[in-house]
Image: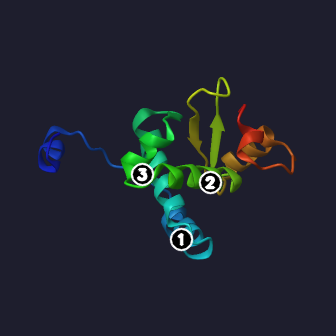
């Protein structure tokens, strides 16, 4: 494992660009109102991974947990909460397949219209109802 200094010199780390909304509103909403700080960490990590990889992120709960420094059950709970809040879209090829996560930004007008087309007007917002996205 490289030290942080070597990684910065070698260019392993990249700048993550976040909407002002994420820090100004979403952080306060998830951490303060919902009292789920782990959800905010998971959202940030998945958003940064999505930027680095250039698309949806296919990872296990264990990989999320180890990358953030939380338990696997905390990662599962956070992913479920983010999906219910429609901040995360989850897709799987099969029931037992590793899921792909796409971080959503429903405060952006272009994503709001796209999300309404994808999700329709269904009142079921459970992660399982969107597992086939």
Instruction: State which quarter of the image contains the N terminus.
Output: top left
Q: Residue 122: x percent and y percent?
A: 87, 46
Crowd band around label 3 with a 10 angstrom C-alpha radius: few (<14), some (14–19), many (20+): few
- Measure the C-alpha gap from mark 1 to mark 3: 20 Å
SS state under label 3: loop
- Measure the C-alpha gap from mark 2 to mark 3: 20 Å
User: Which residue appears at 45% of the width and 42% of the height?
Assistant: 62
The numbered mark, 1 or 3, whose residue comes first in the sequence reads 3
The numbered mark, 1 or 2, whose residue comes first in the sequence reads 1
> Which mark's residue is nearer the viewer, 1 or 3?
1
Q: Is residue 24 left or right of residue 66?
A: right
Q: Is residue 46 left or right of residue 100?
A: left
> Which mark's residue is nearer the viewer, 2 or 3?
2
Q: Residue furthest bottom?
A: 32
Crowd band around label 2 with a 10 angstrom C-alpha radius: few (<14), some (14–19), many (20+): many
Do labels 1 and 2 touch, CB within 8 Å? Answer: no
Q: Which residue is mark 2?
A: 82
On residue 17, the disc is 3
SS state under label 2: helix
- The count of marks equals 3
Q: Is residue 133 above or below residue 78?
A: above
Q: Is residue 18 left or right of residue 104?
A: left
Q: Residue furthest top?
A: 93
Viewer-nearest residue: 104 or 64: 64
Q: Residue 124: x percent and y percent?
A: 83, 49
Viewer-nearest residue: 31 or 17: 31
Crowd band around label 1 with a 10 angstrom C-alpha radius: few (<14), some (14–19), many (20+): some
Q: Which residue is mark 1?
A: 31
């Amino acid at each position: 494992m490289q030290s942080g200094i070597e990684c910065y010199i070698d260019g392993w780390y990249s700048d993550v660009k976040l909407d002002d909304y994420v820090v100004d509103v979403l952080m306060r909403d998830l951490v303060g109102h919902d009292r789920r700080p782990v959800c905010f960490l998971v959202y940030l990590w998945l958003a940064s991974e999505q930027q680095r990889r250039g698309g949806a992120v296919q990872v296990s709960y264990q990989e999320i947990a180890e990358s953030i420094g939380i338990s696997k059950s905390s990662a599962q709970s956070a992913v479920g909460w983010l999906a219910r809040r429609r901040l995360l879209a989850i897709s799987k090829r099969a029931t037992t397949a590793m899921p792909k996560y796409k971080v959503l930004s429903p405060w952006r007008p272009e994503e709001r219209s796209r999300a309404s087309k994808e999700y329709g007007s269904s009142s079921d917002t459970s992660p399982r109802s969107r597992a086939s996205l």
